[in-house]
Amino acid sequence: MDTIPFLDLTPQNEPLRSELEAATARVIASGQFTLGPEVEAFEAAFADYCGTKYAVALNSGTAALHLGLLALGVKPGDEVITVAHTFFATVEAILYVGARPVFVDIHPRTLVMDTRVVERAITPRTRAILPVHLYGNPVDMGALKEIADRHSIPVLEDACQAHGAVHRGKRVGGWGAAAAFSFYPTKNLGTLGEGGILTTDDQKVLDIAHSLRNHGQSGVYRHDKVGFNYRMTAFQGAVLNTKLPRLDDWNADRRRLAECYRGALEGSGVEVVAETPESESVYHLLSILVSDRDQVQQALADRGVQTRVYYPKPLHRQPAVDMKRYAGTKLPVTDSSAARVLCLPLWPGMRDEKVEQVVAQLKEVLT
Ligand SMILES: *Cc1c(COP(=O)(O)O)cnc(C)c1O
């Protein structure tokens, strides 16, 4: 049997090769290599895609989270409610602004923020809530917004894995006061390099993010604030303009493959992570929960099936955060999920028989 990689980007990028080369040539001919018309066109197209008024293109998803928190006015000593089952950047952004992450547990079936436990984590110092649409699966934003609005606390969505995901008929990115997306090459919408974007309906958030991404300038060489160099390059803008019109097809393919996995695994006892009710996940990752996860992963690798673990160590247990501070933090679902989660191969353009091969190997390993 052939080996099955975890991810293969060729079916996505190869059919677009000549268009991508033309886009790159357009940028070279224009002589404008950072921000400029390609980036502005992408900002307008992506805001339109998410159903938001504005979008600010940046050089990473991490930068988008950072500027999102600053634009919402999060300050040193403030608390930000989030989850520990996510990529480290979610928490890095909170630490950049000197705020304190307050971790709540995740839902045992969907592995995203459990909105039932959010309200009791709110204190007078809570300045923002940062839900993560992990694996492309939306948080129950309807329930979360209701709690946040009742307490007048703004929500910043970490949508870095969820471009195009829908909750109650509305795309993620348009639910919070602002939302951060990443265009890291493996994301559902990936560039040929690094990139990110902040979406919002709020003109104030837009103005702050515009200024801070470009050294705090409000006019030419007039610096009102100390900012950053978080600008998106023109090459990334041109690549993303080429790829955005394909995103819905790629996501539909991901959803179709996820259905294949679900069907093939039915009755096998393997638990596939569930979609949040009233939501459509875009399956950035197809994740299952298994006991003896590390042995299962090794046995699959021995049979030529590559899998990955996102994420093996919850963030309140990472040496870079002040672990002592979280000694009393109890996140039983987060801990048990981190020990059992395993992500299976899935990419747009993956052939159905590959899914069947993965499932056949998995069933053998589990018997
Ligand atoms: C990828 C990712 C980020 C960071 O995005 P970069 O573009 O790599 O900086 C943040 N949060 C989550 C959940 C991610 O998956």
Image (cartoon, rainbow, N blue to C red):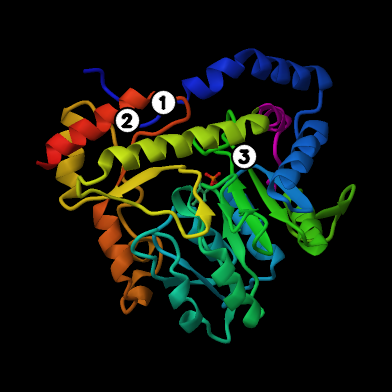
- Hey, which residue is sitting farthest left in the picture? 367
Mark 3 or 1 closer to N-term?
3
Looking at the image, which is closer to me, 38 or 3?
Answer: 3
Question: Looking at the image, which residue is at 49% across and 21% down?
Answer: 11
Up the image or down, 280 lies above or below 252; here it is: below
Q: Tell me which segment is drawn in magenta.
A: 228-242
Circle 1 SS class: loop
Disc number at residue 195? 3
Of helix, strand and loop, which one carries label 3? loop
Determine whether, in the image, residue 65 is placed left or right of residue 332: right
Identify residue type, mark 3: Gly
> Residue at coordinates 73% horizontally, 16% vertically from top-left?
25
Let me know if residue 229 is in the magenta part: yes
Amino acid identity at mark 2: Val
**Residue holding disc 1:** 350
For residue 293, above or below residue 330: above
Total marks shown come to: 3
Q: Which residue is mark 2?
A: 355
Examine the rendering and report whether any part of residue 30 can be seen.
yes
- Residue 194 quadrant: top right
The quadrant of the picture occupied by the N terminus is top left
Amino acid tagged 1? Met
Marked residue nearer the N-terminal end (2 or 3)? 3
Q: Which one is nearer the viewer's eye here, 292 or 329?
A: 292
Ligand 1 lies under 8 Å from the Cβ of mark 3? yes
The answer to the question of whether label 3 and label 1 lie on touching residues, with beta carbons closer than 8 A, is no
